[in-house]
Amino acid sequence: MYWQSFVFTGEIILPVFLLVVLGIFLRQRRVIDDHFVTVSSRLVFTLTLPVLVFLAIAKVRFDSGVHIELIVFVALAILSSCLFSFVWARFAGIDEDDVSAFVQGAFRGNLGIIGISMVVYAFGDQGTQIGALVLAVGVPAYNLLSVVVLARGQGVNWSGQLLMIARNPLIIAIVLALPFSLFGWQLPKPLHSAASSLGQMTLPLALISVGGTLDFGALRKANSTTLQMALLKLVILPILIVSAAIAMGFRGVELGVVALMMACPTAAAAFVMAKAMGANHVLTANAVAVSTLGSMLTMGGIFYVLRIMSLL
């Protein structure tokens, strides 16, 4: 049982880890550069990931109210994570100028790349569908809460921020997929085949880009504040959320999706938003690098424990 669970966990973690390492290697060998990372990241964000999410949600059937409890739970988990991170920052004495960056880096997860990748490798199509629902909740929730956190003490153009969120390609893909899910519509076969090919590009392209963006200099600059952010993101918050999910009765694929996606590292988008809104983007970049590398161990550890407890 223990060995089988260990092997199964390795089969999930290793593909993600190896693709990230490949990105690091290709960057060091100068096969890829900043331009490639920029273009590939934009392609993933604007096209291939939205297509993957569209196809996954289009297969979900809501006629029996399936997964509604999970959707509500994820929304509450994200809000609670944000509040918990803020309270932690206060009690830990984080510098006032760094609180906004600390909170965002500690609660905002990389659902769209690392999270969904782990889910796909762990649970296949069923996991992808549930993971897409988590994305449907997580993307707008993370964006809205990040704006609130980063806007402390400064004015915000809320109409502009809401419009930007509404224009997010993932949000658009989710909205477009809902009629297909609700009414059982089907894409024409040639279009579906082309879309599937695009969706399959997402994981390798996104993970190689993640490896290409990792800054090992950030690891050398990591201080106690960065390590606290990583500890919250990778260990404390996932354990609290997974424990709550177990107490609420979630099991199997639903519990596995919650565990993997809520335990994923700090989102790279957190750096972009921190820089745009005048927060400590250097601290955020450090958190992204440290948590991304650390997540390969912590996500695997959480998944392994749930497997040997026969909860998945």
Image (cartoon, rainbow, N blue to C red):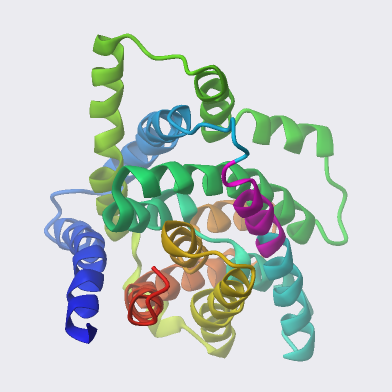
Q: Residue at x 32, y 54 (%)?
A: 123
- Identify the residue at horizontal 50%, vertical 19% (top origin): 180
- Asked if residue 215 shows in the view, the reply is yes
Quarter of the image where the C terminus is located: bottom left
| Left or right of 90, for residue 131 | left
Residue 307 to residue 120: above or below: below
The stretch of residues the image draws in magenta is 66-77
Compare residues 210 and 80 and report the one nearer the observer: 80
- Give coordinates of residue 41: x percent, y percent: 37, 42
- Which of the pair 275/158 is nearer the observer? 158
Q: How many marks?
A: 0
Q: Main secondary structure of the magenta part?
A: helix
Q: Quadrant of residue 21?
A: bottom left
| Residue 274 x, y percent position in the rendering | 63, 58
Q: Residue furthest toward the front?
A: 64
Report the side of 91 relative to 170 (left or right).
right
Q: Position of residue 262 (x, y in %)?
A: 52, 64
Give the quarter of the figure containing the N terminus. bottom left
Residue 240, horizontal then vertical, whole percent: 61, 78
Give the quarter of the image for residue 176. Answer: top right
Residue 27 placement, left or right of 224: left
- Indicate whether residue 225 is drawn in magenta: no
- Residue 276 appears in the rendering: no
Q: Using residue 58 as the reference point, say whether residue 25 is left or right of it.
A: left
Name above or below for residue 306 compared with residue 64.
below
- Which residue does the image show at 64% across and 68% down from the upper left? 248
The vertical placement of 25 against 69, above or below, is below
Q: Residue at x 66, y 30 (%)?
A: 166
Q: Where on the picture, by quarter, is residue 242?
A: bottom right
| Residue 73 highlighted magenta (yes or no) | yes
Q: Nearer the viewer, residue 279 or 177?
A: 177
